[in-house]
Image (tube, helix red, strand yellow):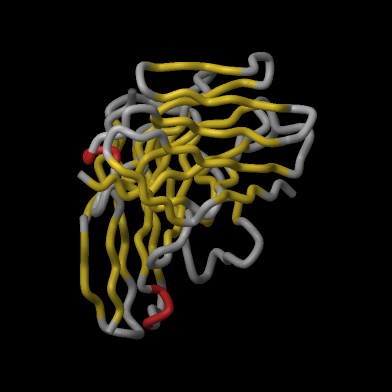
């Protein structure tokens, strides 16, 4: 089955700086890679996703890059703000496969210091 | 995005008892999933709830411990049976709808077993 590794497990940045979280996956059949943000006491919220037919996607201060050859993808947050403090999870899935299951990375706790 | 309501949001239960968690979606969805998130950990898929048939369980999870119902396309329940303190976790309902790739999560049920 799929295995997703995520690094770092914790990340502390100064407000205004950039944050980068990296994930690797093992199953070359995976073709859909979402990122979730989980705030304390809440369920995970989808913040951006990318499919394997593109290499990069941006949405305001958030961007995701994908290197399918190397089987890794990254989340980039620019101009970080205190409200970006949360736990971030990457995930991988093979669309159209039976079950369409998501496999999650271990999570990254991001702390943005004012 | 789908609006997902989970009940209860939290509970404290005695060991040996059972708790049923409800998940209600505001629209019909093809796929519903149940996840467990142990304290400070990532999300682990328990099972896929299949409408009109038995749920599909992941390795390490069994129907006797986590019976699941899905009577229609907008509702599912997960029961945690014969609870022990090791079952203390957040339980999350997730949905994916038809051709849509995105998976959305409920706010979770925080279960503490004493």
Measuring from the top left, give residue A10's x and y in whole percent.
Answer: 44, 55
User: In this view of the protein, which residue sits in the foreground, A81 or B92?
Assistant: A81
Q: Quadrant of residue B4 in the image?
A: top left
Q: Residue at x 29, y 45 (%)?
A: A112
Q: Is residue A95 visible?
A: yes
- Left or right of A82? Residue B72 is right
Q: Is A48 rendered above or below residue B112? A: above
Location of residue A34 in the rendering, given as x and y in whole percent from the top left corner:
51, 32
Give the x, y percent position of residue B21. 31, 57
Quarter holding the C terminus of chain A is top left
* Left or right of A73 in this view: B71: left
- At horizontal 35% and vertical 17% (from top left) the residue drawn is A60
Q: How many marks?
A: 0
Answer with the quarter of the image where residue B24 lies.
top left
Vertical side of B75 occupied by B83: above or below: below
* Residue pictured at 40% horizontal, 79% vertical: B82
Asked whether residue B45 appears in the rendered view, the answer is no
In this rendered view, identify the residue nearer to me: A2 or B17: A2
Q: Nearer the viewer, residue B108 or A39?
A: A39
Q: Which residue is rendered at x = 54% and y = 64% of the image?
A: B63
- Horizontal side of B9 relative to B43 (left or right) equals left
- In the foreground, B63 or A27: A27
- Residue B1, given in percent of the width and then of the height, sits at 33, 23
């Amino acid at each position: 089955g799929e295995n997703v590794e995520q690094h770092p497990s914790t990340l502390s940045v100064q407000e205004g700086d950039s944050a980068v979280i990296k994930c690797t996956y093992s199953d070359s059949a995976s073709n859909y890679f979402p990122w979730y943000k989980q705030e304390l006491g809440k369920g995970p919220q989808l913040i951006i996703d990318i499919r394997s037919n593109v290499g990069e996607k941006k949405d305001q201060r958030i961007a995701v890059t994908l290197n399918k050859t190397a089987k890794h993808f990254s989340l980039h947050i620019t101009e970080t703000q205190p409200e970006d403090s949360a736990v971030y999870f990457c995930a991988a899935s093979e669309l159209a496969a039976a079950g369409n299951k998501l496999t999650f990375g271990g999570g990254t706790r991001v702390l943005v210091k004012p | 995005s789908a609006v997902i309501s989970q009940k209860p949001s939290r509970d404290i239960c005695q060991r040996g008892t059972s708790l049923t968690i409800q998940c209600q979606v505001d629209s019909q969805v093809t796929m519903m999933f149940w996840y467990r998130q142990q304290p400070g950990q990532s999300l682990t898929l328990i099972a896929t709830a299949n409408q009109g048939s038995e749920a599909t369980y992941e390795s390490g999870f069994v129907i006797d411990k986590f019976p699941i119902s899905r009577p229609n396309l907008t509702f599912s329940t997960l029961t945690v049976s014969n609870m022990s303190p090791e079952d203390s976790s957040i339980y999350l309902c997730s949905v994916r709808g038809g051709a849509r790739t995105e998976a959305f999560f409920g706010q979770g049920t925080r279960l503490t077993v004493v």
